[in-house]
Amino acid sequence: MNKLTLSALALVATFGLAACSSESDEGADFERAGENAGEMMDDATDAAEEAWEDATGQDESAWGEIKEGAQDAADEIGEGARNAADSIGEAADEAGDAMEEGYDELVQ
């Protein structure tokens, strides 16, 4: 390659690295990734259970399916409530920090 091509490649790589290393608070959401992995494991377990029941002829009764569905719904509602509580707590913390910063600015 000639020097111009290499220079252009180095410049593009530098801009790419600079864009990737910006100091934003976003970053990787490992908590959400963990939740997604947990949901995928739950789905895989449910699918394996259903396949086993179909293969052995030991299908759950209608009452068993209703209980399982109710348990799944309760789990989803509980998870949603935990997520909402976490969000409210974070928002309250941010509001408290903003109030404290505003007070500090007024005092100075």
Image: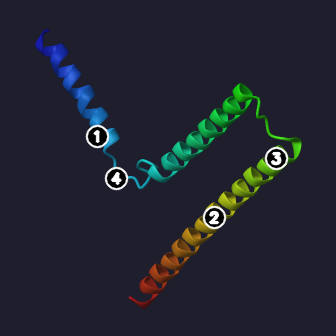
Which of label 3 and label 1 is nearer to you?
A: 3
Q: Is 103 left, or right, of 88 in this rendering?
A: left
Q: Quadrant of residue 91?
A: bottom right
Q: Quick one: label 4 or label 3, which is nearer the N terminus?
A: 4
Taking the spot 68% from the left edge, 29% from the top edge, the residue there is: 51
Say whether marks 1 and 2 touch (CB < 8 Å).
no
Which residue is label 2 attached to? 82
Task: Calculate the distance from the C-alpha at mark 2 to the C-alpha at mark 3.
Answer: 27 Å
Task: Calculate the distance from the C-alpha at mark 4 to the C-alpha at mark 2.
Answer: 29 Å
Q: Quick one: label 4 or label 2, which is nearer the N terminus?
A: 4
Tell me the SS state at disc 4: loop
Q: Is 4 left, or right, of 62 in this rendering?
A: left
Say whether marks 3 and 1 touch (CB < 8 Å).
no
Which residue is label 1 attached to? 18
Which residue is label 3 attached to? 64
Tell me the SS state at disc 3: helix
The percent position of residue 100, horizontal first and vertical second, equals 47, 83
Q: Is 62 left, or right, of 12 in this rendering?
A: right
The percent position of residue 25, horizontal first and vertical second, equals 41, 56
Q: Quadrant of residue 3?
A: top left
Q: Looking at the image, is 92 positioned above or below residue 71?
A: below
55 or 103, which is in the foreground? Answer: 55
Q: Quick one: label 3 or label 1, which is nearer the N terminus?
A: 1
Q: Is 90 left, or right, of 16 in this rendering?
A: right
Question: Type of residue at label 1?
Answer: Ala
Task: Calculate the distance from the C-alpha at mark 3 to the C-alpha at mark 1.
Answer: 56 Å
Q: Quadrant of the C terminus?
A: bottom left
- The residue lying furthest to the left in this view is 3
Say whether marks 4 and 3 touch (CB < 8 Å).
no
Disc number for residue 23: 4
